[in-house]
């Protein structure tokens, strides 16, 4: 019956009782034993299967609920992306892929996946700031989720000064080696120094440059119609520095227009002649 279920067939209790010369209660007990086996086997395979009763087919069939574990190829891809991000210190970048592989790959395949990334781990070059900020990033995420004001001491590179801001945090984003906090400035005097005062976009802060964080009990409210949309923001902003949105027209004569359109998702081709794009 297990082989029949595994091959996708429907098992009818009455038919199986006749086939094996037993009563239907015996068949029911066998089905329960198979269901119990599948529950235990999910730890080995990473796939949760169960037996369900199909009223239309009038019998039992095998159904895959979901896969607990990622596939080997998926974990390998995630580890490669993580290493290529160069967002964390060397110590963190050794620990995180190892934890990911241990938690998400079957034990018999873990050694293979680790070997495929070992060279990149060995030659990994950590960012110059050498700052561990994962716990800080989690705290910022909680403030965003609960719509709480925050106060930060932020290291500003243009004058090498640490400045204090009260902010309304709205998102955490990643782009090219750095994690960023996007937030609206609450202090009116500070806002006067920004060109983006009347812009609908928040200011941008590199999380590794936040020297201290205080999450306030005070909450802020942004109407749904004015909510911050990370996807739209990501398409238009090249990070590192904020500013007013501008419309530009440029000529491209390279070999791969897709590289431009992927880098600037809002760009549109206006004209093309002899391999040159406007």
Image (cartoon, grey):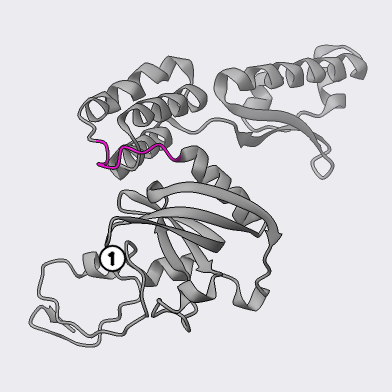
Name above or below for residue 107 compared with residue 120: above
Q: In this view, does 46 lie to the left or right of 114?
A: right
Q: In which quarter of the image is the C terminus?
A: bottom left
Dominant secondary-structure state across the stretch colored magenta: loop
Instruction: Give residue 34's quadrant in the image.
Output: top right
Q: Position of residue 36 (x, y in %)?
A: 75, 18
| Extreme residue in the left direction | 274
**Disc 1 target residue:** 263
State yes or no: residue 157 in magenta.
no
Q: Where is residue 157 in the image (x, y as percent from the top left)?
A: 28, 57
Q: Is residue 212 left or right of residue 158?
A: right
Name above or below for residue 211 compared with residue 43: below
Segment colored magenta: 126-133
* 77, 27: nearer the viewer: 77
* 248, 107: nearer the viewer: 248
State yes or no: residue 130 in magenta.
yes
* 154, 50: nearer the viewer: 154
Q: In this view, does 144 lie to the left or right of 22?
A: left
Q: Position of residue 103 (x, y in %)?
A: 51, 25
Q: Residues within 10 Å of mark 1 (few under 14, many from 20)?
A: few
Q: Which residue is drawn at 44% across and 56% down?
A: 173
Q: Which residue is drawn at 59% across and 28% down?
A: 47
Instruction: Give residue 5's quadrant in the image.
Output: top right
Q: In which quarter of the image is the N terminus?
A: top right
């Amino acid at each position: 019956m297990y082989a029949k279920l595994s091959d996708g067939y429907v098992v009818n209790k009455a038919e199986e009782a006749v086939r094996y010369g037993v009563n239907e209660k015996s068949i029911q007990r066998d089905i329960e034993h198979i269901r119990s086996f599948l529950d235990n086997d999910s730890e080995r395979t990473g796939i949760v299967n169960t037996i369900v009763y199909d009223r239309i087919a009038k019998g039992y069939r095998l159904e895959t609920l979901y896969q607990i574990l990622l596939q080997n190829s998926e974990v390998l891809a995630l580890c490669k992306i993580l290493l290529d991000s160069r967002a964390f210190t060397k110590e963190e970048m050794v620990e995180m892929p190892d934890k990911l592989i241990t938690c998400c790959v079957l034990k018999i395949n873990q050694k293979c996946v680790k070997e495929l990334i070992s060279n990149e781990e060995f030659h990994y070059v950590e960012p110059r700031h050498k700052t561990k900020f994962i716990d800080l990033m989690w705290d910022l995420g909680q403030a965003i989720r609960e719509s709480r004001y925050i106060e930060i001491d932020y290291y500003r590179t243009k004058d090498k000064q640490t400045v204090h801001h009260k902010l309304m945090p709205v998102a955490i984003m990643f782009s090219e080696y750095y994690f960023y906090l996007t937030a609206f400035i609450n202090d009116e005097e500070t806002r006067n120094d920004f060109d983006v005062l009347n812009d609908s976009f928040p200011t941008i802060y590199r999380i590794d440059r936040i020297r201290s964080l205080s999450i306030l009990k005070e909450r802020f409210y942004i109407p749904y119609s004015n909510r911050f949309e990370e996807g739209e923001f990501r398409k238009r902003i090249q990070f590192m520095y904020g500013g007013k949105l501008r419309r530009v027209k440029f000529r491209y004569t390279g070999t791969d227009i897709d590289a431009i359109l992927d880098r600037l998702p809002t760009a549109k081709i206006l004209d093309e002649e002899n391999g040159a794009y406007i």
